[in-house]
Image (spheres, helix red, strand yellow):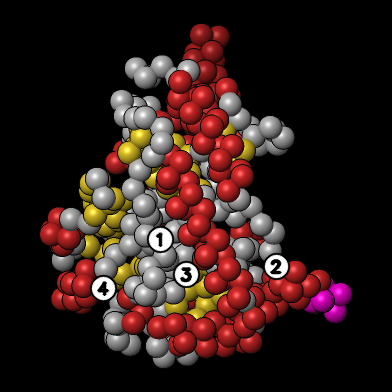
């Protein structure tokens, strides 16, 4: 009897321990390797942090003041699920100016660009659905569909001496009729690769034929460095009202508002009609004072965008030139976004390298493997910083590479 009780007790403990864990889809999510490096050194005053996609400037005064004025006016209550009508109208006007006719009824305000991506995925993807993504890619976007039980297939960009290129035929081959959604981020994080208008037309036509939804992550569309354009090519400019297209965006990069957590999605009106339910069950609504700041940013922020774009372009060119002066690095000029994704000769463990760099020299970079196996051997550097900080970072990289065992 006693032996039986012991066996029962052991089994009970085992079952209880298993019950305390998350469901398998969550357990299988890959942790952020960027955070793994950063968490070990955040708060250290000696670290130069280039690991996150974040500028080294604070949000402009006039944007911050709008939030302060809202708080002083007592706007601390809930707002509409879809966002303040004034902000939805401002976003619609902004998108109309950039890409063509957009109505406020096609806009949902979200608590960050990441939330916009999560909501769009929840609306369109379910267990067992097939999702295709172009990688290397920000890990959050690859993992979101997996939380919902979807199967994700990745199609890798190809590294060439002149930069990253899309194998369009390979991508089209992956977009079979049983595909539910294609996720595409352009300009791309981490590579800076930017899709061409011709490639967009081919992909959109293919998705139309097979009934595939296309979710475009347009977070970096204003950080595009072509002399002939101030915005990257957008699917919004060639799509019709009947197309299965969702564009997500954020205030974080364009208006230097990373910590505010404000974004939006633009989608067919019929899809937007169901978004209040999803927003209610996720975040309820974005804070009113944050939305007031967003209105001012979008209505008065064009000079901020132009100054930021010019500053980042100079920083990009400066960093590329300095990195090319270090033996063993292959560096291409990214046409968009805010990152240089460079290849290190003989590198087989980018996570180990980035841990070594932050531990030995105080240089914070993101390991290429964080963006998928296609990124192994590469390192991401966010160049949204002053030339002085970038120059110091390059010297720390040079010193760190000299002491890093290349067999690692």
- Residue 392 is left or right of residue 161, and the answer is right
Magenta region includes residue 71: yes
Q: CA distance from mark 4 to mark 2?
A: 33 Å
Q: Earlier in the sequence, mark 3 or mark 1?
A: 3
Question: Which residue position holds label 1?
Answer: 336
* Tag 3–tag 2 contact (CB < 8 Å): no
Instruction: Report x, y in % for residue 221.
Output: 43, 68
Q: Earlier in the sequence, mark 3 or mark 2?
A: 2
Residue at (55% x, 47% y) in the render: 52
Q: CA distance from mark 3 to mark 1?
A: 8 Å
**Frontmost residue, 29 versus 195:** 195
* Up-down relation of residue 61 to residue 238 (above or below): above
Question: Is residue 80 among the parts visible in the rendering?
Answer: no
Mark 3 falls on what kind of element? loop
Q: Earlier in the sequence, mark 4 or mark 1?
A: 4
Instruction: Report x, y in % for residue 71.
Output: 82, 73
Q: Which residues are magenta?
A: 69-73
Instruction: Report x, y in % for residue 265.
Output: 47, 74
């Amino acid at each position: 009897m006693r032996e039986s009780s012991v066996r029962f007790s052991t089994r009970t403990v085992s079952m209880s321990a298993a019950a305390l864990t998350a469901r398998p889809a969550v357990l299988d999510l890959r942790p952020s390797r960027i955070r793994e490096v950063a968490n070990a050194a955040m708060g250290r005053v000696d670290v130069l942090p280039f690991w996150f996609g974040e500028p080294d400037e604070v949000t402009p005064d006039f944007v911050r003041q709008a939030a302060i004025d809202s708080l002083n006016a007592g706007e601390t209550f809930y707002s509409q699920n879809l966002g303040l009508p004034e902000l939805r109208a401002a976003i619609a006007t902004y998108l109309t100016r950039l890409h063509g006719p957009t109505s406020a009824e096609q806009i949902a305000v979200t608590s960050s660009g990441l939330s916009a991506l999560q909501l769009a995925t929840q609306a369109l993807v379910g267990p067992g659905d097939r999702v295709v993504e172009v990688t290397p890619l920000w890990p959050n976007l690859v993992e979101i569909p997996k939380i919902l039980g979807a199967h994700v297939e990745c199609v890798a960009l190809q590294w060439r001496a002149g930069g990253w290129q899309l194998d369009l035929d390979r991508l089209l081959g992956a977009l079979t009729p049983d595909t539910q959604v294609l996720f595409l981020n352009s300009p791309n994080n981490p590579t800076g690769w930017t899709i061409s208008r011709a490639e967009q037309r081919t992909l959109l036509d293919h998705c139309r034929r097979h009934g595939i939804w296309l979710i475009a992550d347009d977070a970096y569309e204003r950080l595009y460095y072509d002399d002939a354009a101030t915005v990257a090519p957008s699917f919004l400019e060639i799509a019709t009202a009947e197309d299965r297209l969702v564009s997500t965006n954020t205030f974080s990069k364009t208006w230097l508002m990373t910590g505010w957590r404000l974004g939006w999605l633009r989608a067919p009106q019929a899809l937007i009609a169901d978004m209040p339910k999803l927003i209610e069950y996720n975040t309820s609504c974005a804070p009113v004072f944050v939305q007031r700041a967003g209105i001012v940013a979008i209505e008065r922020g064009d000079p901020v965008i132009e100054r930021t774009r010019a500053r980042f372009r100079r920083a990009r060119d400066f960093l590329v030139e300095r990195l090319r002066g270090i033996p063993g690095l292959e560096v291409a000029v990214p046409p968009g976004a805010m990152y240089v994704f460079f290849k290190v000769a003989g590198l087989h463990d980018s996570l180990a390298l980035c841990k070594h760099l932050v531990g030995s020299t105080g240089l914070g970079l993101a390991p290429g493997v964080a963006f998928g196996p296609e990124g192994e051997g590469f390192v991401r550097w966010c160049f949204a910083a002053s030339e002085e900080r970038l120059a110091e970072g390059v010297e720390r990289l040079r010193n760190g590479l000299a002491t890093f065992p290349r067999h690692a």
